[in-house]
Amino acid sequence: MGAQLAQAVQKRFKNQTRLIGVHDFRADAARGLASRLHPAVPVLSLCQLVRRSDLVIEAASPQAVRQILPEILRWRRDLMVMSAGGLLEQSGLIRKTGKAGIRIYVPSGAILGLDGLKAAAVGRLSSVTLTTRKPPCALGMGKIGRPKVIFSGSAREAVKRFPQNINVAAALSLAGLGPVRTKVRIIADPALKENVHEVEAAGDFGTMQIRTRNRPSSANPKTSQLAIQSAVATLERIVGSFQVGT
């Protein structure tokens, strides 16, 4: 995803932005990405990247988010987070960034309906439930004969147990009831080749049911195409002057 977003910055947003560098804890991966970009960009340390940027884009892991946040606060830079799960246990730092005037953007990712959920949360929101269905291989499982519920609990627990698979639960909880009150079920389904996310919410506004069936990215099967497009759409909102939706 990081490679595709870097390319989008250089091509789609070339008149509004400039890519100043890349960083990865795996130096060989960072060098490989930097050399594939046109024009090529330098590989920077995390501190260098944050210090020289106006906006930092994270597309790595929840652990990376936790490493980036202190640097963001130190240099007062804005941040776009793809690994939303990395924000759930960082409320103290997030409050500090808010006081410092730092903006943190969380794209919707592989899920629909966050705009409606945010609007619903302005009033009384009574329940939010996410049911995620994935092929067993996407959850690190072997072959199974029938659908199996492998997790049922809060969004906070889901993110801890499945940090690479359930960022949608983190984004959903940040938009609505929070990680403790947002309920999550994860189902391994051998009949699926795609990931399916179903959101149900209820409150003063009424009820909401949304189902998203995600196709994987052709460039990276581990990432949904919608998640990548969501990040690009967020960049358009950041650099643009015309916005539609909540």
Image (spheres, rainbow, N blue to C red):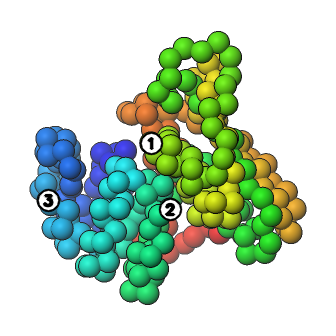
Residue 189 in the image: x percent, y percent? 64, 24
Residue 163 in the image: x percent, y percent? 46, 45
Residue 242 in the image: x percent, y percent? 54, 72
Query: Marks 1 and 3: which is nearer the front?
Result: 1
Mark 1 or mark 2: whose residue is earlier in sequence: 2
Residue 213 in the image: x percent, y percent? 64, 36
Q: Quadrant of the C terminus?
A: bottom right
Question: Looking at numbered disc 2 in the image, what kind of residue is underneath it?
Answer: Leu
In the displayed structure, 217 sits above or below 238; it is: above
Q: Residue at x 55, y 33 (%)?
A: 215
In the displayed structure, 103 sits above or below 176; it is: below
Q: Residue at x 48, y 72 (%)?
A: 91
Q: Quadrant of residue 63?
A: bottom left
Secondary structure under the numbered disc 1 in the rendered image: loop
| Residue beneath disc 1 | 164
| Residue beneath disc 3 | 44
Q: Is residue 134 visible?
A: yes
Count residues near mark 2 (Cα–Cα under 10 Å), then give few for <14, some for 14-19, many for 20+. some
